[in-house]
Image: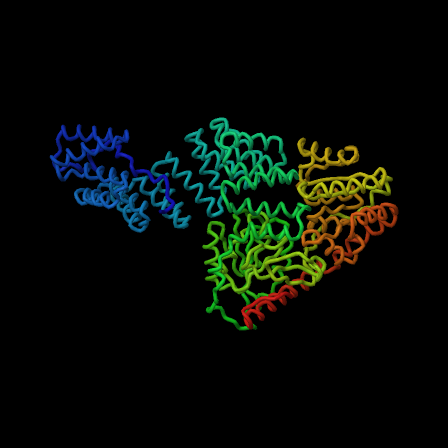
Amino acid sequence: MNNITNRGGTGKIFTETDRNQINGKTIFKKPSASLEEIFEIGNTYHKNNQLGKAETIYRKILENVPEHSGALHFLGVIAHQSGNINRAIELIENAIKLTPEYHTAHNNLGNIFVDIGELDKATKAFKRAIKAKSDYAQAYYNLGLIESSKRNFNEAIDYLKKCVDINPRHIEAHIEAGQNFINIGNKINAQIAYKIVLDIDNENTQARLKLAQILNDLGIIEESQKEYELGLKIAPHDTRLLNGLGRLLAKMGKFQLAFQYLYQSLEVNNKNTETLHNLGSAYQAIGDIKKATDYYESVLKIAPHAAFSEKCLLFLALNDPSYSLDQFYDLHLKLRGHNNKPEHSKKKFKTINRNLNKRIKLGYISSDFRKHVVAQNIAPMLTNHNHEKFEIFLYSHSINEDEYTESFKRSADHFKYIDLLTDEEAADLIEKDKIDILITLAGRFDENRPLIATYRPAPIQVSYHDCATSGLSDMDYYFTDKFISPKNSKEKFTEKLYHLPTYYQYPIRKMPEVNEAPVIKNGYITFCCFNKPEKLSNQVIELWAQVLKRIPDSRLMLKYFDYYCEPLMKSRIKKLFTDYNISPDRLILKAKNDVRNEHLKLYHEADISLDPLPFNGATTTFEALSMGLPVITLKGDRFVSRVTTSMVAHIGRPEFAANTPEAYIKISEDLSSNPNKLNEIRQNLRSQIHNSSLCNNEVYTTEMEKAYRNMWALWCDTNDYREF
């Protein structure tokens, strides 16, 4: 059945004041006062859902006046309400034959066709209703719903505009128009539509909810919060509003308030999977991995295979040092394996041109073609692609755009939106585009959709910028390098590894000047970490506590947005260190600064950056090194815990990477013991990183294109994949 709702008319009685006339013409062939009175009684029963009594009266009328189109019409409506579709169509069509300009009958006939999926017939019926009554707002509204269901959003908006031009107080039309504006990325007009609804009905919680969501998307956070709060004054137990506000407050780093609203939602419905997931997300954000895991798993007990909660559990595993490599791999197979589709794995791609030297079609899928760390990593490559040899398709499943999005559009030959498509529909589009190599970016992060690959839309499929195996049998390759995944690594992948000369790539952007190491002025060492709190496992806290104990008077500066300054988070982090006998006075908890340069200037206050484990920093590592800070890291046994090891190796500073916790502490002692040497390192690090392969965008792109050629040549020759 088509997903069209709120059409009006279906099951609703004709209540216009000229009930007995259509455009001035009588709908009775034999009008009489007594029949009109009886018809009114039938209508009243019908309105009150007393269908049996209404039907009896309509039939009694037809016994006396067989051509009474009104009674035929409403008997048809009752038949529709009772599920007798064929009889409903027959009766209403008979009414229309008697009175061709009977606009409400045309409208209700259209509603029946919608319910049985006959959208073309429904469209014709609604258009006939408009022909019969040119200012019939409801028919325009219904046409808007049909076009929206067909994803013809601009056409839908045109019909909905006509509806509200006729009836400016048609609330459902304004709400539907708002959603269609969202669908085409026009959030400003959507915002206007929902505000109009609230001007008409200040207590409309649906419009209030939508307005709050849009304001959040537009980054107007405080106004969004106000709208949620206004909605909750009207509907204090509305779980949609409670969840929305809780999620927003967590995003703002106001965790105490966030938990308050989320637990209120849980009291309303303790099986609400959205609430349970949001609680998991909030606990994940403050670093309580145990509680986060419990809530995500509770979602899966209610809704097995809920994709987003599964993805979050895989993300949490990156932060959990307790997983052995086998357990880590098995978790991915457990949470992802059920998505594999063997029937799609057998595709032969007979229409794909297998010319080795052809212009290869590359498709990149992401939700992050905007201001985002993943976008920052791939932008240099996309900018430098050889478009004579490669045809670039970008598939975006996010409607959140900014100035960076425009840059991505310019760097591609084709930019396509798939945010409103299902995974299967997106895969069909990609296959129709005859993509040769499909690259899924950052599969487990944000809104990304790696499960599109399970439909095997391309002969070669690559996972790039994820931090572990996808767990999918139809993901063919996984990009890495020799430092992240050395030959003796025992980490398991469902993919074949492709070792690039360099894995990470960063654009050189303007940054604040490197200052003198603050230890020279302060007389004590300041360590820092600007990573997410969820990366601060107990293993990390214990290790850093030992570092602070071994270096007297040293301090530790922590920053991630405003998280560390929020009361709940501040209390939690201080307790974690106090448990290891580190005084809270030695912690410097910084608030956010939205201006990038001001954020980077905070590195002026620190001497050495401490890398978390098992989930290393990436962009934070690059920024710290670029600001002159050595980044001390502990080599792990998996991709996610060897990222910084790779970066410091590529800039010629492998001595920053420790093989053991004791070596990690020793490196921190050695660097701290000689402030002048530390300052010398500080003054040279930026040039070292900027002159390294991490920032050689042209060479990196050439190596990536070579990798794609190698994959393509092997597949053309063997239909297979192997490690490179």
Front residue (pair 634, 564): 634
User: Which picture quadrant has residue 249?
Assistant: top right
Q: Decide: is 121 above or below 279.
A: below
Q: Is residue 131 left or right of residue 65?
A: right
Q: Quadrant of the C terminus?
A: bottom right
Q: Position of residue 565 (x, y in %)?
A: 69, 34
Q: Position of residue 84 (x, y in %)?
A: 25, 42
Total label count? 0
Q: Is residue 390 left or right of residue 674?
A: left
Q: Position of residue 614 (x, y in %)?
A: 70, 48
Q: Position of residue 329 (x, y in %)?
A: 62, 53
Q: Residue at x 79, y 46 (%)?
A: 608
User: Which picture quadrant has residue 24?
Assistant: top left
Q: Residue at x 37, y 41 (%)?
A: 5
Residue 628 in sight in this render: no
**In the image as oriented, which residue stretches furthest toward the top?**
233
